[in-house]
Image (cartoon, grey):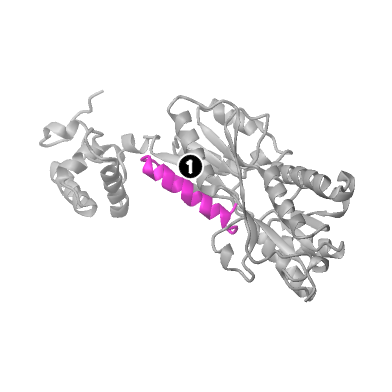
Amino acid sequence: MTKQPAAGRAPARTRRPVGVQAEPRPLQSGAVTTRLADIAAQAGVSEATVSRVLNGKPGVAATTRQSVLAALDVLGYERPVRLRQRSEGLVGLITPELENPIFPALAQVIGQALTRQGYTPVLATQTPGGSTEDELTEMLVDRGVAGIIYVSGLHADTTADMQRYDRLRAQGVPYVLVDGFSPKVQAPFISPDDRAAMNLAVTHLVSLGHTRIGLALGPKRFVPVQRKIEGFVRTMQDQLGLGAETVERELVQHSLYTLEGGQAAATALIEQNCTAVVCASDMMALGAIRAARQRGLEVPKDISVVGFDDSPLIAFTDPPLTTIRKPVPAMGQAAVRTLLEEIGGTPAPHSEFVFMPELVVRGSTASAPGDRARP
């Protein structure tokens, strides 16, 4: 449909004048020209380029288009309704929190990969007492996102209602789920191999002479926790001949994915005479080191500690942390690639893309106390 021109002289392009849709009253052509000049100066482009962007004309680079839209925001102008309704430029990313450095690291990889493809990431983070995953999802959908990437969300919780994802699919919003698989959700999943991670950690510690190895991790209802337990128990059976029931009863401690949670779990494992502790996150591993020191133990002389994630700066702790490196770059890029295929109309099958972790040996692991060669 063609809009009626505003009162006064109407240039040829006033069929879609700058900002008319967002203004409660018509604009005079002089005001439009002034606005174009302001935006062009802010964005560092010509007025003609600004006009092409605001009118949705082709021939403008994605980076230039983003600069013009950013100039609109900086100058306090409302974007024309037609531009605000464009959905292909925004992708939501929902994370459980940002205190654990692995989540900002993953968000950075995903954000950079989206930006390279011309999309703008919108980070939505849950906080205690703040917005829930469902509320953040609704907010993103209301803003017309092209798709959503969930990291360690409710899809990883075996007690959660998975119908929320079916409802989102019915709304036509593509999504990809990272860390946590559910057979009830028809979507692509991106995961590290948690079972293989535990095999790497336990095998390393057994090679150092440890036979009393504990596992500190989060609540059992989460899929990554269950898989880590499976890998841990199986490797302890295979390499040390321990019974599954004994391992789970004496050598597995559930807590929170925090420094305090790791401290509490490690304290219980030390009381079970463990000479090594495998933790399900680097934050928990730092808590385990604190627990050992509070009991007068030295790491790694008296007790070895292994983390999980290889978070930024973890190589510079005291001692530098031996950890299982989560393949964050590969996982983040795969999540973006898979989502963009969904957005492009070629959805991936209901499947799980599993990425192999890597053992990074540093200074927090050493030979078991009774296994060291005497001088």
Determine the image quadrant of residue 14. Answer: top left
Q: From which residue to which does the magenta span run? A: 97-122
Q: Is residue 17 left or right of residue 375?
A: left
Judge whether residue 237 can be spotted in this image: yes
Foreground residue among 327 and 210: 210
In which quadrant will I find the C terminus?
bottom right
Tag 1: residue type?
Gln
Q: Residue 92, image x and y in percent?
A: 48, 42
Query: Label 1: how many residues lie within 10 Å, few (<14), some (14-19) or many (20+)?
Result: some
In which quadrant will I find the N terminus?
top left
Determine the image quadrant of residue 244. Answer: top right
Q: Residue 166, image x and y in percent?
A: 61, 28
Which residue matches tag 1? Answer: 333
User: SS of the residue at dot 1?
Assistant: helix
Q: Residue at x 23, y 38 (%)?
A: 60
Q: Is residue 234 left or right of residue 32?
A: right
Q: Residue at x 67, y 29 (%)?
A: 184
